[in-house]
Amino acid sequence: MGIFINIMPKPRHFNYRPLYYDERKERLEKIKARVEAEQKSGLERGFITEAHANSKKHSLSFEKTSVVRLLIALALIGVLYLLMPEFFTSLWKR
C-alpha cells in the first residue's frame, strides 16, 4: 500500500480582512443586541419580579408578626412568674 491517492482536495483557508473597521458602530450594535435581549427576558421575567416583590412584602409582615408574637410570649411568661413564682424557682433548682 505504498501509494495513497487523495480524492478530496483540502479546503482553502478563508482570510478576510475588512478594509474599513468602524469600532463605534460595532459597539452600538452590541449594545442594541444586549438591550433587545434584556427587553425580551424582562417581559418573561415580569411575573417573577412581581412575585419577588410580593414575597418581600410577605417576609416583612412575617418578621413584624414574629416580633409581636415574641413580645406577647415574654409578657405571658412575666405574668406567670408574678402569679406563680414558686413554679419558676422550682424549675431553676432542678
Image (cartoon, rainbow, N blue to C red):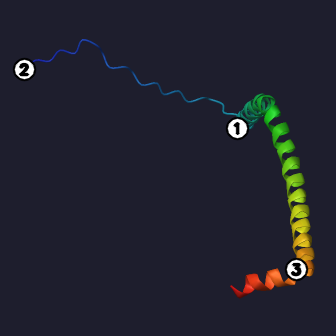
- Horizontal and vertical percent for residue 78? 90, 76
What residue is drawn where x is 72% and y is 88%?
Answer: 93
Q: Are marks 2 and 1 in contact (CB under 8 Å)?
A: no
Mark 3 residue crowding within 10 angstroms, few (<14) / some (14–19) / many (20+): few
Residue 23's disc number: 1
- Which residue is denoted by mark 2 in the rendering? 2
The kind of secondary structure element at disc 2 is loop
At label 3, which amino acid type do we have?
Met
Q: Quadrant of the N terminus?
A: top left
Q: Nearer the viewer, residue 37 or 8?
A: 37
- Which residue is denoted by mark 3 in the rendering? 84
At label 1, which amino acid type do we have?
Glu
What residue is drawn where x is 92% and y is 71%?
Answer: 75
What residue is drawn where x is 86% and y is 53%?
Answer: 62
Q: Nearer the viewer, residue 75 or 21?
A: 75
Q: Nearer the viewer, residue 84 or 56?
A: 84
From this viewpoint, which residue is outermost toward the top? 7
The kind of secondary structure element at disc 3 is loop
Find the distance from the CA under tag 3 to the CA under tag 2.
Answer: 108 Å
Mark 2 residue crowding within 10 angstroms, few (<14) / some (14–19) / many (20+): few
At label 2, which amino acid type do we have?
Gly
What residue is drawn where x is 74% and y is 85%?
Answer: 92
- Asked whether, in this view, residue 41 is left or right of residue 50, the answer is left
